[in-house]
Image (cartoon, helix red, strand yellow):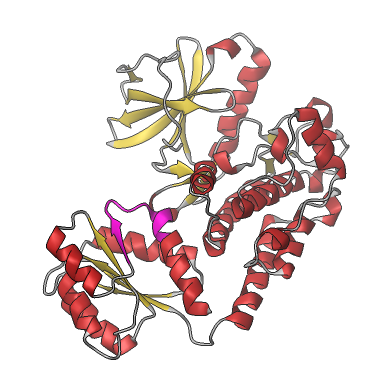
Amino acid sequence: MSDHDAAHHESGPIPIGITLDDTYHVRRLLGRGSMGLVYLCDDVRLERSVAIKVLAPRYAAEARVAHRFRREAVAMASVRAENVVQIFAFGDFRGHPYFVMEYVPGYTVGSLIEAANQREEQLYLDVVLGILRQACRGLQAVHDRGIVHRDVKPPNMLIGPNFRVAIADFGLVETVAQPSDVRDLAGTPLYLAPELIRRDNVPDHQLHLADLYALSVSTYEMLTGEPPFDAPTVGEILQLHLHRAPPSVAEIRSDIPQSMAEVLTRAMSKAPGERFSTCQEFMQALDGARQQQAMASSRSAAVRVLVAEDDPEMRAIYSTALTVGFPGLIVLTADDGLAALDLARQSRPDLALVDLNMPQLNGVELAAALRGDERTARMPLIVLTAHLDHDSRRVLEHLGIAQVLAKPIDVTALLAVVGEHLQRIGQ
């Protein structure tokens, strides 16, 4: 569970500071899921952070809700996948059932969209595809277990370290084996598939396509900043899902090809049978459209980005994020300034990310050396630093540094900056 959402002042049914089962020390309240409250805890035995979700007190006496809560835990526990939040244990505290799950420090895709909207910016296309590619893998793993999530939306997609995306909140989960007469209308109206609104008797092999519909609506929102169907009332929103065709994303964003817009429109088809059959097929179609666009608009040589960072953990984070965010990108890495200079002269990267404080040559010295070599003189440089004194700033400005990013660096912000430069490179 992500800690993006602000914690509430109330502690809920579990007091802050206690230790559950002599194992989980409760630190603070993170927020709320669809049926419960989520706490950040320390697993004192295994020395790791975990999240604990407890059923909300107002549901404690409702057997059906308690059953659904346990069903959520069982569903999560049955899926072992990198892009699905993992569950570790199930327990009870004074009549309040809870389960222990993986803690994903970071933020949600929903908050990422909100931040971009506040900046009046749009998420870079390849960043969206990098998120979606992982979300599709997670949902595919869920569907392969015969499970339907039923509440796929940006707030339920977590972005953690190394730009890892994980599907969370299975509070409305349904299994294919569940009798159709106990399935009810549940979900978030902005992302609700038409067949769920109509309460259609959907064949078992198509039940998961409601998740695909919600995922495609979420994709539309990531690309445009707004969901395709919105209105003042829930009833009006549901009518739009049933009867209105979504506006084409290609008409809203000039960098999205018509072929990709058509893929997204198909995934949002009103009839389940007209959509793609799996999340994997949907992602393959999007990747195919993106590759066709790249082949038509960019130069034939692969784009190279140099990462010069002496901290091995940060170097790995930057490299992984760039590789996931921009498929096909060649990432070169160096652990000191001198190695970076040699690598830049040999490989002539299109862009370089340079840590200011490195052994052998620091960032300022490296930038000066790169600018003094005709092979790398025009290469855009992005400097990464926790502190930049006045003299260093003046020198970097004189050297024509493209941008300075302050540490600790938000991976999504880094991807956005790199994406802007890659767009210029491809023009």
Residue 350 at what x, y percent from top left?
39, 80
Q: Tell me which residue sits at (62%, 46%) in the image.
A: 142
- Membership of 405 in magenta stretch: yes
In this view of the protein, which residue sits in the foreground, 17 or 96? 17
**Residue at coordinates 64% horizontally, 41% vertically from top-left?**
152
In the displayed structure, 203 sits above or below 339; it is: above
Residue 119 is left or right of residue 230, and the answer is left
Residue 305, by quadrant, is: bottom left
Residue 232 on image: x %, y %: 73, 30
Using residue 28 as the reference point, say whether residue 61 is left or right of it: right
Q: Quadrant of residue 64?
A: top right
Q: Is residue 26 magenta?
A: no
Image: magenta residue range: 403-415
Q: Is residue 166 visible?
A: yes
Residue 303 percent location from the top left of the image? 45, 79
Residue at 27% x, 36% y: name it: 47
With respect to residue 21, does 374 lie above or below?
below
Q: Residue at x 42, y 62 (%)?
A: 417
The answer to whether residue 15 is above or below residue 52 is above
343 lies left or right of 184: left
Quadrant of the image occupied by residue 282: bottom right
Work out whether 185 lies above or below 266.
Answer: above
Closer to the camera in the image, 26 or 156: 156
Asked whether residue 183 appears in the rendered view, the answer is no
Residue 244 position, x and y percent, is: 84, 46
Q: Residue 201 vs residue 418: left or right?
A: right
